[in-house]
Amino acid sequence: MYPQLFNYIDGRFIGGEGGAGQAIHDPATGERIGWLPWADGAQLDAALAAADRAFQHWRISSPLDRSAVLRKVAELARERAAAIGRAITLDNGKPVAEAIAEVLNSAEHAEWNAEECRRIYGRVVPPRNPAVRQLVVREPVGVCAAFSPWNFPFSQAMKKVAAAVGAGCTVVLKGPEESPSAIVEIARLFHDAGLPPGVLNIVWGVPAEVSRHLIESPIVRKLSFTGSVPVGKRLAALAGAHMKRISMELGGHSPVIVFDDADVDEAATALARYKMRNAGQVCVSPTRFYVQRGIYERFVARFAQVVSEIRIGHGLEDGTQMGPLIHGRRLAAVHELVSDAAEQGGEIVTGGARIGERGHFYAPTVIAGVPDHARVMREEPFGPVASITRFDDVEDVIRRANSLPFGLASFVFTHSIKTSTRVANALEVGMVNINHFGMAPAELPFGGVKDSGVGCEGGSETFDGYLVTKMITQI
Ligand code: NAD
């Protein structure tokens, strides 16, 4: 049921058991389900050389041809969504309905890039001398090294590949070794959609070694990374040393601000379900809940009730709403933050412990009255943990919301336009959701500020990170 895994270099699927690599496990059971073959140094160089060769023709390809490939990828992704989704559930743990939805949403991203790549316009600038013609054109940046994460293994990689390929770039991608099946399926989709050999290459190996090898190569002109802030900073520093362009989608610690005038029960119910999606392993997951004093008790009670009713199990079982965490490290990290919050005076209203000994399950957890200095309020929890605290006035809550180095998503619940406008203008973040959750459709930019990253994916900004500007003046 779990697919065989490969490297994908110059249009060929390479690997299998035998050479260096690593076993892949189901995070819900701990059982070995597959084998991920690593690329050696010569294969990394072969992938770079293939991407370099392919760039020479792909950079001048017709946008109509690039658009056709991306449309075909979307069509095939929809056809194969159920099988791809099942494999994602096996190596990632998320409920299969969420995994299939991820594939279907990614089909829209491929389509969006297929449409936008026909509109990569330049401009004509009025000259001072009428005999002169001044043009500004936008060209693909070149070979891109991309690194995508395990939490949304299909969609995060698809966003990078569809944008790079649509812009006329070529790619060497290292996916997440925790959840690799989605990446190999993406390679199959592009392969079957007729992408020329070398335009997309997939390689696996020891992350720090692969990233250094690729980023230091003079062939690579751009780095795109989605993952944690510390790793992002390390890779950005390496890219900076070699003057490579970067796009960074990093961690967050999203503030949620619920005002007295919000629909308390509705907001608490919606937020509780949204919080536990993908077991909270979401960069834009709501994590710091600031609730105004007048509705605080009612909010906590409703939120905890909904959270405690979430059905936990293997993602392939009927009715499962939340699966396991991705690996043992995450389990330990989450529990450390919860324990610290309790020691600092937070009240564990529900959850607070690992579930069973098999698999990496952690109970959905609500901690009330968490002080701002507790680690869970300062460090990204990246797990099924909601920390709730009170606030009194709008200026104070804005200050607290902006007090961390993160700046990714935020959530505001109020019926006052004056309040929502004030808060939306003041929050130091890349995305503000007011009274609903509306992030990540293909037509909207997705990205952060401060430590949460550089650049956007999606929206009409989708190619910004993959294009360079050239001025041409002629007489
Ligand atoms: P981790 O730091 O151990 O990250 C592991 C992941 O990062 C692996 O997929 C690995 O391949 C990659 N990685 C590590 N070092 C690398 C290097 N030098 N070069 C290239 N890739 C490298 O963390 P974890 O416990 O697995 O995940 C939790 C953290 O990851 C969270 O705090 C969160 O910020 C971050 N994360 C963020 C996103 C996002 O969408 N921004 C997605 C997934 C994970």
Image (cartoon, rainbow, N blue to C red):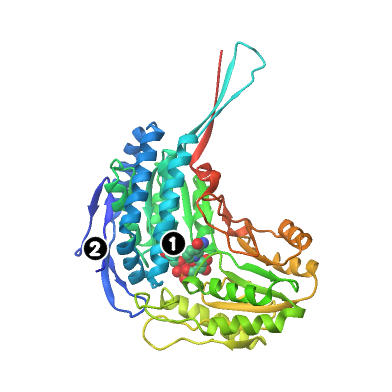
Q: Which residue is mark 1?
A: 149
Q: Residues within 10 Å of mark 1 (few under 14, many from 20)?
A: many
The quarter of the picture where residue 361 lies is bottom left
Residue at 22% across, 58% down: 15
Residue at disc 2, secondary structure: loop
Numbered label tally: 2
Answer left or right for 26 relative to 158. left
Q: Amino acid at mark 2?
A: Gln
Separation of disc 1 and disc 2 at Cα? 20 Å
Mark 1 residue's CB less than 8 Å from ligand 1: yes
Q: Position of residue 294 (x, y in %)?
A: 77, 79
Quadrant location of residue 372?
A: bottom right
Who comes first in sequence, dot 1 or dot 2? Answer: 2
Q: Is residue 258 left or right of residue 24?
A: right
At 52% across and 77% down in the image, what residue appears?
384
Judge from the rendering whether residue 212 lies leftward or rightward of residue 348; answer left or right. Answer: left
Q: Is residue 9 visible?
A: yes
**Quadrant (top left/top right/bottom left/bottom right) for the C terminus:** top right
Residue found at the far top of this picture = 131
Q: Is mark 2 within 8 Å of ligand 1?
A: no
Q: What number is the disc on residue 4?
A: 2
Residue 440 x/y as whole percent:
53, 57
Does 278 sit left or right of 348 as displayed?
Answer: left
Q: Are marks 1 and 2 in contact (CB under 8 Å)?
A: no
Instruction: Specify whether residue 221 is in view.
Output: no
Q: Quadrant of the N terminus?
A: bottom left
* Residue 413 percent location from the top left of the image: 68, 68
Which quadrant of the figure has residue 386? bottom right
Q: Does dot 1 land on a helix, a strand or a loop?
A: loop
**Mark 1 belongs to which amino acid?**
Pro
Q: Give the vertical position of 48 relative to 4 (above or below).
A: above
Q: Residue drawn 56% across and 87% down?
A: 350
